[in-house]
Image (tube, rainbow, N blue to C red):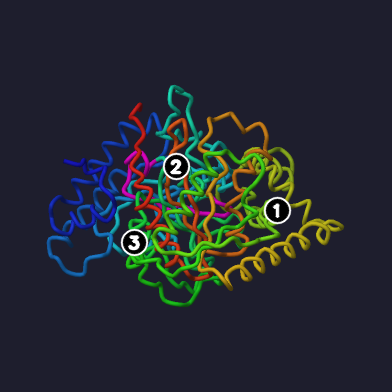
Amino acid sequence: MTSLTELKLTDAVAGLKSRTFSSREITQAFLDAIDTSNPHLNAYVVVTHDKALAMADAADARLAKGKKLGRLEGAPLGIKDLFCTAGVRTTACSNILGEFTPTYESTVTANLWDAGAVMLGKLNMDEFAMGSSNETSRFGPPTSPWRRKGDNRPLTAGGSSGGSATAVAADLCLAATASDTGGSIRQPAAFAGLVGIKPTYGRASRYGMVAFASSLDQAGPLAKTVRDSALMLEVMCSPDPRDSTSIRSPVPAWTKAPGKSIKGMTIGVPKEYRVDGMPAEIESLWEKGVEWLRAAGARIVEVSLPHTKYALPAYYIVAPAEASSNLARYDGMRYGARKSTDGGLTDTYETTRAAGFGLEVQRRLLIGTYVLSAGYYDAYYLRAQKVRARILADFDAAFQSVDALLTPTTPTAAFAYGERSGDPVAMYLNDIFTVTANLSGLPAISVPAGVDADGLPLGLQVIGKPLDEDACFKVGAVIEESAGFNARPDRWW
């Protein structure tokens, strides 16, 4: 019999509604697993034992009545530490927020609780979501449950949602919330053998999310299957008047998309994504993906996205610029940590920010402040915004003839901690296949599709038209079924 913690989300929801097991039983099973495993994996930075059991008991009472049940009634989930949770510490894994405990709930998490879900705790992440490996967290990095064959070095589960990916891959929650500013859902999904989707910009409310780069940030789920991710995203998304960028249209029934035929669809393969030095394993997996979609009845065509080569430099101007503006509010005055000094107000600001922000956040804030400064705003920030418009125009042109795009998710499999942290540029290159969807606001999903020679997961990415998450789920489900990915990490923890 499958352990309760090993269940897929949709199977667990079905089991709860049929009363095969109770929410308290599955929640306690996860809490026990967290207590045993988290000292080794460091996925959770807060575990809400009492709150989880209280929420589970309330769900069981509703399940017993069998009326007005939520779509996730009784299902235990993990929450990235970027989402404000009323009464539960939220720090974005940064020292500068100290022990900040919000008095309000983010819209995304409120939607989950309204659907009956249970909160197990808050999940580790890169500080303020700035990172591709989860090495910048104030709580230290989480450790992926995956290992290379014959190599015991700890691997990253990706960033910035590394805690979310670790928790789902290690069966420490049924699914988890995550956020994606330049690939922070999709890259961890690829590294950890999971499904992760970033929806169209504006689908999920940003209210109550700790901001990094407001024109790029978007919430989404990490889950074990395409169907699980569709269910999570349906619940997480909603129109929200408290977010000025929120899309005011109803959320589609995405759970109906997996399993639909893709016969007659045209899938584009961008030639610019064949980058120099890409491992042969990634290229081979991409070709397999093409064949799987062709066998399912899709037509495959090559397309050109000529401004792709400018995406990464444009992103690393736009994102730090917006971060420098957003993070200016953290001054130690109103909330969070404060480093008092014998000097004046300016000294307190400077000392607090120097002690509160980690080195990677400081690096990006300095870059952002520089590109927004007088004399450089036109040369850098405005030019990056023009490049961003060209990238979106490339996608618009491609989508005149194709229904979706197929690309690799990452240029490599997961790497060991310390392998790239000394070279920021090498770290930033992890986002080469993912940042374009953020710059253009497009939906994109990563689906596990194979393993490399070391036995580590590799993912394929499907990018859809604006507001066409349906295509991402349809094509993603075909890849999932064709790949038959069932690899699991050997339990070492």
Could you say where residue 373 lies in the image, as x and y percent from the top left? 81, 56
Could you say where residue 123 lies in the image, as x and y percent from the top left? 43, 44
- Residue lying farthest bottom? 249
Three-letter residue code for mark 1? Lys
In the image shown, does 206 or 3 lie closer to the viewer?
3
In the image shown, does 435 or 357 lie closer to the viewer?
435
Query: Between disc 1 and disc 3, whose residue precedes?
Result: 3
Q: CA distance from mark 1 to mark 3?
A: 34 Å
Above or below — where is 193 with respect to 390? Answer: above
Question: In the image, which is nearer the foreground, mark 2 or mark 3?
Answer: 3
**Quadrant including the N terminus:** top left
Residue in the image at 45% along x and 50% along y: 101
Could you say where residue 64 lies in the image, as x and y percent from the top left? 12, 61
Within 10 angstroms of label 2, few (less than 14), some, or many (20 or more) residues?
A: many
Q: Please say whether residue 182 is one of the residues in the magenta stretch.
A: yes
Above or below — where is 172 with respect to 195? Answer: above
Q: Which residues are magenta?
A: 167-183
Three-letter residue code for mark 3? Leu
Residue in the image at 65% along x and 40% along y: 360
Within 10 angstroms of label 3, few (less than 14), some, or many (20 or more) residues?
A: many
For mark 2, what is the residue?
A: 163
For mark 1, what is the residue?
A: 309
Circle on res. 231 = 3
